[in-house]
Amino acid sequence: MFPIRRYSKQRQKIFELIKMSRSHPTAQWLYGALKKVAPSISLGTVYRNIHILVEEGKITGRAYGGGTEHYDAIRDVHYHFICSSCGAVSDFPMPVKEVITREAQKISTHSISGHTIQFHGICEQYRKQA
């Protein structure tokens, strides 16, 4: 169990930004966005509060390549699209196929609890720029 923490305006703002974002923001992006409205915020504060939000189960973090962690407030299982050109990460609106988890369990000696799928290609925004 994690300790009960007092309310933090900065943590709440970080959480709101992650919830509103469809792009699975990085800590660096969050820092840049927060710096505009709270110039005294430090990158360390952003990382510390992200860590707390992950620990509390409010957000998840995942590296989609490139070594940078991206954050997501959607806790339900869902798929992602990663742009091979610009690195943008977005939710992919395809229903989750639970049959994939069941089929994997049939052929595995491991205990399978779920799956993730990442689609790769060129995003619409990058294609329009090219």
Image: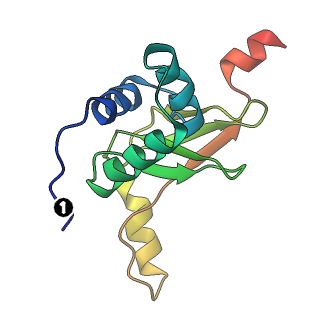
Outermost residue on the right side: it is 130
Q: Residues within 10 Å of mark 1 (few under 14, many from 20)?
A: few
Point 45% across, 61% down: residue: 115
Quarter of the image that includes the C terminus: top right
Is 109 in front, or is 5?
A: 5
Is 50 in front, or is 67?
A: 50
> Height in image: 41 above or below 97?
above
Using residue 127 as the reference point, say whether residue 40 is left or right of it: left
Outermost residue on the bottom side: it is 109
The quadrant where residue 126 appears? top right
> Height in image: 15 above or below 54?
above
Residue 106 spot, x, y in % from top left: 42, 79
Point 64% across, 31% down: residue: 88
How many labels, in total? 1
Amino acid of disc 1: Pro
Point 38% across, 81% down: residue: 111
Outermost residue on the top side: it is 128
Is 22 in front, or is 110?
A: 22
Residue 127 spot, x, y in % from top left: 77, 17
> Height in image: 98 above or below 27?
below
| Residue picked out by circle 1 | 3
Using residue 72 as the reference point, say whether residue 26 is left or right of it: right
Using residue 53 as the reference point, say whether residue 23 is left or right of it: right
- Helix, strand or loop at label 1? It is loop
